[in-house]
Image: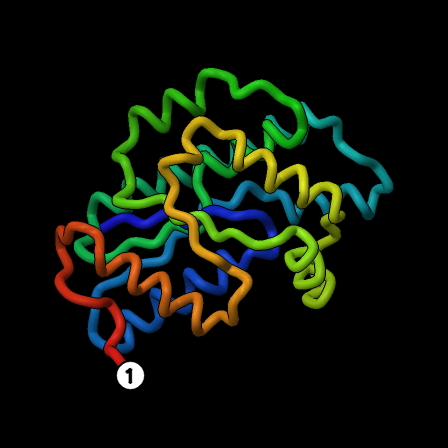
Amino acid sequence: MLIVLTGIDGSGKSTAAQALVSAVQARGGAALLLNNHAGRRAMSVFSAKLGIRLPARAADAAETIFRVWNVLLNHLRTSRFDGLVVMDRHLYCQLALRAAKGLPRGRLLPWLLAALPAPDAVVHLEVDPRLAHERIKARGSDAESLEDLTAFDDGYRRLPEYPQFVTVDASVPAPELVRRLDALISQLPPRSMEGPLLAPN
């Protein structure tokens, strides 16, 4: 079973993905976490140190190379794994970033989405950009502006794929979010797993 998590920075994707996979593994289930990052944080830190800001198209080109490589490699890993695979981010994220920056979708990413095996569900973690901004400031490892987060949120909503996403309220505490994700996943048609992923309280 393949689940993809999407959402703006500060929505809790990585935390929720790791917690869900760890919980499944703790109870003896087979689960794998795969990250489809694009190197945005590293590039942001590097640009800040140099005091420069990469042009939108240049930044997108670099991010796309990293993202596509990770997605292709992780789909190969998924094909060899029998159990729950949770992907933290995917090509949808890059398309949303393009929409946020006013860049065209292009042909490569939509073609890859059509060519790659479809996930069992794309779960979008919804959170108010203001709350996401507060979370980012609290962790102190990123420098995303509220304006950028708002544009990113709008970019997701304008994706033609967005109506097929399963949306989950990510404003709740992490343990509750994991519980909701488990409930959602347990309702999907099972392939290699049966029953709820987490033991009930």
Viewer-proximal residue, 116 or 124?
Answer: 124
Q: Looking at numbered disc 1 in the image, what kind of residue is underneath it?
A: Asn
Q: Which residue is farthest right?
A: 51
Residue at 51 percent across and 17 percent down: it is 106
Rendering coords of residue 42 (x, y %): 66, 48
Where 165 falls versus 160 (above or below)?
below
Q: Examine the rendering and report whether any part of residue 126 can be seen.
A: yes
Where 155 falls versus 146 (above or below)?
above
Query: Quadrant of the image for the C terminus?
Result: bottom left
Q: Secondary structure at mark 1?
A: loop
Q: Which residue is farthest top?
A: 107
The quadrant where residue 148 appears = top right
Rendering coords of residue 110 (x, y %): 41, 23
Task: Say how many tags the image has.
Answer: 1
Rendering coords of residue 124 (x, y %): 45, 48
From the image, tell me which residue sits under label 1. 201
